[in-house]
Structures are given as C-alpha cells and as structure tokens.
Amino acid sequence: MKNNKKILGFLALAAIIAFLMLACSDDSNEPKGTYSLGTTMTFRDYQVWERNYSTTKLSNAHYEFKGNRNIVMGSIAFPVQAPPDPPTSYTYEFPIGSGEIKDGYLNLNIPALGNAQLLDSVDLLRTFFTGWYWDVPSNSPTGKISISPSETNGHMVAIITDSENIIRESLSGTKTSLSGEFINYIYVDRACTISADEVVQYTYTFNSFNLSLNAGWNAICDKQTYTSSGQSSRSWELKHPDHKWTIVAAGKTLADFNDIDP
C-alpha cells in the first residue's frame, strides 16, 4: 500500500496505549478467549516476538524473539491534557507482580491488588481512555464518558523492561486500509459499566461504546482502522483474542515500518 507510511503515522499513539497489557496462559485461571480474567493472573511460557521494520509485507511484520529480559510491571498515569493534543509524558507508579523473558518466552505473575494500588474512577478513565477524547473532569469537553457506579476504583498495567515496552498486537489490512488490534488489561474492584459517546475530530472517529466489566481483570480490545483516503476510526470491545506478545524498543511506533502491503 503506497500510502501506508501516512496511514501508519496515525497509529503512533497506539504504542502508548497498547503496551498497557497483561494476559494469562492456557494453564492459568483464565479461560482462553474470555475477557473476564479473575482477580489474579499468571502467564506462563508465551513466545515473545519482535517487529520487523524492514519488511514490506504484513505477514512478515514479526519474528520470534530469542533473548532474555527482566520485567517490571505497574500502573501508568497520564497528565491532564486538553484535546486535540496527545499526552507527551506519563508517570509510572505502584509496582506490582513479577516477571521475566527467558530464551524468548514470557512468564508473569500478578497477585491480588490492594486498595493502595488502585486509581479512583476519574483517574482511571483519564488514564485508560486517554481522556482528551472525552469530557473527563479537568479536560476540555469533546464528548461524554462515564463509569457506573462512580465509586469504582481500578488499575491498568504496564509491562516494561529497562528500555522496551511489552505489548500485545495483531495487524491486518487491504490495499486501501490498515487495522491494528491491541489488547489492554484493566482491573476494577467491582462490576461496573463504562460508556462513551461517539467523538469525531477532523477525519478521526472514536466510536461510542458500552462496556460491562466484571470485578477483577478484564481484557479490552482497542481496534484502530486507517484508510489511504485519510479517514480513520477507533473502537473498543470486551474480548480476548490470542494476539502476539511483542517487544518494542522505546520510542518505536508502527510509523517506523516501511511502506507495507498486506
């Protein structure tokens, strides 16, 4: 696709959002494919991949990682920022769990979270849904987003090494469009519903959603589609597909791929 360089540029933000993830293995307490994951998560022996930025084919966009890495996990908090500008920094807080990559395989464990590790509902919405799209308190109003009950507290996890992000992703496309799916993991201390209006900014549409989360960890799929005509859309739904765990150097985004065809 000749215009993929431009299309992939729109996906740069995904590198911030998409690395806020954690999953469970087949032998853990998580039923495969189910978005509701329970209060603890253990992830065993999953192959890790690297991006192949030199390829021109989506089918070759990843290759197996063979190395070792120490991993730290915690929450990410974005600063309040008015639309349409994305945040330029974040705060890493509340270290939780333990993990490593050994010989290319990822092992992680997160125990049950305590109240001291949870964000209140306002910070949770601002952080997870990067609140410059919607009217989270202290942000400029671009649409309405809410969580019910409002007393809900929660957590989102980042998985990082000293200089890399660990994200979970899948790429697909046609001659005129490119899509990326990124699995995000969010913890809430009670069953709740997060709802948002549709927001349209320039040529970018953020679709409305209504997500009913269960207490504990939930998998939310962030799908982003971009076309060569410049139109783009983004949607969220509760599902847990088996996408690739991918190690990404700090500062690298999908825009670093060369022109790439399906």
Image: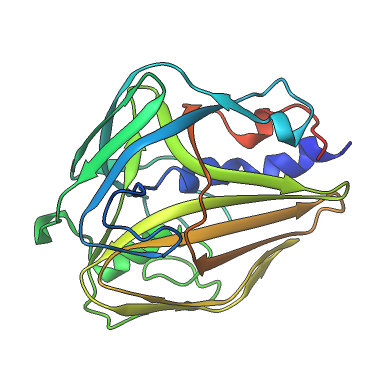
Instruction: Residue lying at the far bottom in this picture: please name it.
Output: 149
Depth check, front residue: 146 or 108: 108
Residue at 67%, 24% (x, y): give it. 53
Q: Is residue 87 visible?
A: no
Name the colouring of the figure. rainbow
Asked if 87 appears above or below 132 in the picture, the reply is above
Q: Which residue occupies the extreme front position in the image? A: 27
Front position in the image: 16 or 63: 63
The total of numbered circles placed on residues is 0
Please give left or right for residue 248 compared with residue 39 in the image. right
Q: Position of residue 187 (x, y in %)?
A: 28, 61
Residue at image position (39%, 22%) is 163
Which picture quadrant has residue 120? Answer: bottom left
Could you tell me which quadrant the N terminus lies in? top right
Q: Specify the quadrant that holds the C terminus.
A: top right
Left or right, 131 with respect to 197, comes to: left
**In the image: residue 65, left or right of residue 24:** right
Q: Is residue 207 above or below residue 47?
A: below
Residue furthest top in the image: 67
Quarter residue 112 falls in:
bottom left
Q: Horizontal and vertical percent for residue 131? A: 45, 62
x, y percentage for residue 176?
Answer: 87, 50
x, y percentage for residue 213? 36, 74
